[in-house]
């Protein structure tokens, strides 16, 4: 397991939880290491809000989380978008001012938030002052605007070192800028009025930069470099930097359109012919004698691991189980008075064991469905994946958690019979899925691990692995698990990449199967009765799944790896 990846995911979850608590927005989470709010990307424009989890400066992340939460509380996104200017440099200034306005509204009853905001901005300011950003006129002007606006809106004193640096640039501010500086401070509580002055400042800054470029005969290369260093989300202005006039508004719209595409993909997804689809059990396709040999091979691989399954089971039970009442303990020296033992006050006055206490036990009212990618690319890892799955299933059962092991692949390479039928039909456009699927049950939830040992070893039959249709496999697993009586239902997808079926990919629109997987995952994540998470084999799957982690199979698995998986399950629950 990659330690850096696990740590980053913990910090992201902590950051998202902080934002949810302060903003009262329940739909805040990270996907693909990008912040998502109400199922749309949340774009952070202020340069000092860069989310750098690699530095492990958690005290700085507090300030970022508080800033995001205040933006969600005090800013109307619809009204803001309608006012965003067209020029990239003006967009950056306008976004900065709106962020600073929201932060200035932090209530005085929460001094910790105010302190976090101040520390975060000053940390960035000192770093920027020592960087190449201030080595040209444009960078110095924008840095000065950042600092001066922060100082006025937050009523904070500029540090002496930074004040000396920006003094010359601030002295050259126009009267128009100074007028807006005076007015916007008085209107921080009114977004529409404040926006007028913010636009005035943004336009004036843009005019000053254009005037400086014309006077010096410079091209816009210096401006582009400055925007690259200032823009928090580097992707927003990338098209403009490459010669296209894209704006932040267009970038936001493009992100939302992409999300809508993912949502609608579930309804547009088609299957050309499902007549050859099948669900099989391991014993249906592999002889019992061969399963016995494969089980011996798997046991040999498992012995190479350093995993304490009982310790893992205890950890799983603590994280996933819920406390339940389980009777009474009698003859206690404290607790509830036991009326049946009151006679002891007379017969044994020195015996104080007159009480009873309620027993609390951990009950694992939970079922876990592990969906395993049986595509050709997984054959490189099949021995270690089989050992991982077997050990995890055994640990879950020891923790009284029901476990179902499912696999998915296709019946043929490159379409097979379905592709031939499509060719006979004249190859109509956008036919949908052009292969038949084969879903495998390695272990049903009601089957004990000991009885399913041989079937689980069927994971070693790599010649049965072909291509993968992940989205349909997820929906199949959800259909199976939803009828289970357990309260907590969890699906774990184990995969090493995006879905791929050669015939389907060639005959349909770009990313056809990817979009369906994203839509299928999103539909399950919205359900209150099923929780979804993913394990990426050497790959980050957060582009598809809200809760995921990557796992490295380059070394033998150890107990800590399964502890990390247990934490993932705990987050899902």
Image: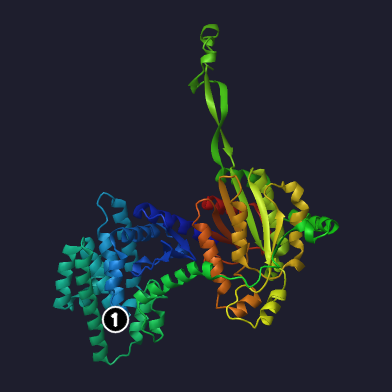
Query: As drawn, is 183 to the left or to the right of 275?
Result: left
Question: Residue 320 at x, y = what percent?
Answer: 56, 46
**In the displayed structure, would residue 276 be above or below residue 58?**
below
Q: How many numbered circles are shown? A: 1
Q: Position of residue 443 (x, y in %)?
A: 71, 53
Q: Nearer the viewer, residue 111 or 495?
A: 495
Which residue is tagged 1? Answer: 138
Query: Going 36% across and 84% down the picture, which residue do you hit?
Result: 245
Query: Where is 36 relative to 310, above or below?
Result: below
Please indicate, yes or no, whether residue 157 appears anywhere in the rendered image: no
User: Which residue is at the front of the view, 110 or 498?
Assistant: 498
Q: Residue furthest right?
A: 289
Q: Is residue 111 visible?
A: yes
In the image, residue 25 sits, relative to residue 80, either above or below, namely above
Q: Is residue 425 left or right of residue 82?
A: right
Residue 349 position (above or below residue 8) = above
Q: Residues within 10 Å of mark 1 (few under 14, many from 20)?
A: many
Q: Residue at x 32, y 61 (%)?
A: 71
């Amino acid at each position: 397991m990659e330690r850096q990846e696990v740590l980053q995911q913990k910090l992201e979850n902590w950051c998202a939880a902080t934002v949810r608590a302060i903003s009262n927005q329940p739909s805040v989470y990270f996907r693909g290491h990008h912040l998502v709010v109400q199922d749309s990307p949340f774009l952070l424009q202020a340069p000092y809000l860069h989310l750098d989890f690699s530095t492990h400066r958690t005290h700085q992340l507090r300030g970022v989380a508080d800033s995001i939460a205040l933006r969600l509380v005090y800013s109307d996104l619809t009204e803001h978008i309608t006012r965003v200017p067209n020029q990239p440099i003006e967009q950056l200034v306008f976004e900065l001012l709106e962020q600073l306005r929201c932060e200035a509204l932090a209530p005085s009853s929460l001094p910790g938030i105010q302190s976090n905001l101040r520390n975060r901005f000053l940390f960035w300011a000192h770093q920027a002052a020592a960087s190449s950003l201030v080595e040209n006129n444009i960078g110095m002007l924008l840095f000065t605007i950042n600092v001066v606006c922060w100082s006025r809106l937050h009523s904070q004193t500029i540090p002496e070192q930074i004040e000396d640096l920006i003094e010359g640039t601030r002295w050259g501010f126009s009267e128009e800028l100074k007028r807006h500086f005076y007015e916007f401070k008085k209107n921080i509580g009114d977004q529409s009025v404040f926006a007028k002055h913010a636009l005035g400042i943004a336009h004036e800054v843009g005019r000053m930069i254009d005037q400086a470029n014309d006077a010096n005969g410079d091209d816009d290369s210096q401006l582009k470099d400055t925007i690259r260093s200032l823009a928090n989300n580097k992707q927003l202005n990338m098209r403009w930097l490459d010669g296209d006039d894209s704006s932040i508004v267009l970038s936001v719209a493009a992100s939302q359109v992409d999300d809508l595409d993912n949502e609608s993909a579930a309804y547009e997804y088609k299957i050309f012919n499902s007549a050859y689809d099948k669900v099989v059990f391991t014993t249906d396709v592999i002889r019992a004698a061969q399963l016995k040999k494969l089980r011996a091979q798997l046991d040999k691989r498992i012995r190479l691991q350093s995993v304490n399954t009982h310790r893992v089971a205890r950890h799983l039970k603590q994280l996933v189980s819920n406390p339940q009442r389980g009777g009474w303990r009698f003859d206690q020296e404290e607790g509830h008075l036991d009326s049946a033992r009151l006679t002891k006050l007379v017969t044994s006055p020195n015996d104080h064991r007159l009480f009873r206490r309620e027993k609390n036990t951990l009950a694992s009212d939970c079922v876990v469905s592990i969906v395993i990618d049986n595509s050709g690319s997984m054959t490189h890892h099949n021995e270690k994946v089989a050992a991982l799955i077997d050990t995890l299933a055994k640990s879950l059962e020891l923790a009284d958690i029901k476990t179902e092991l499912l696999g998915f692949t296709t019946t043929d390479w490159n379409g097979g019979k379905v592709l031939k039928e499509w060719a006979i039909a004249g190859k109509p456009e956008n036919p949908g899925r052009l292969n038949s699927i084969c879903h495998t049950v390695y272990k049903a939830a009601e089957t004990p691990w000991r009885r399913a040992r041989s079937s689980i070893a069927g994971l070693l039959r790599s010649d049965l692995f072909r291509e993968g249709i992940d989205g349909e496999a997820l929906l199949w697993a959800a259909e199976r698990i939803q009828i289970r009586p357990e309260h907590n239902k969890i699906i774990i997808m184990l995969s090493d990449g995006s879905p791929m079926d050669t015939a389907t990919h060639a005959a349909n629109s770009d990313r056809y199967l990817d979009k369906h997987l994203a839509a299928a995952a999103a539909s399950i994540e919205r359900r209150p009765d099923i929780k979804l998470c993913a394990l990426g084999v050497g790959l980050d799957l957060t582009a598809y799944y809200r809760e995921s982690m990557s796992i490295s199979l380059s070394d033998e698995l150890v107990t800590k790896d399964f502890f990390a998986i247990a934490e993932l399950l705990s987050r899902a629950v």
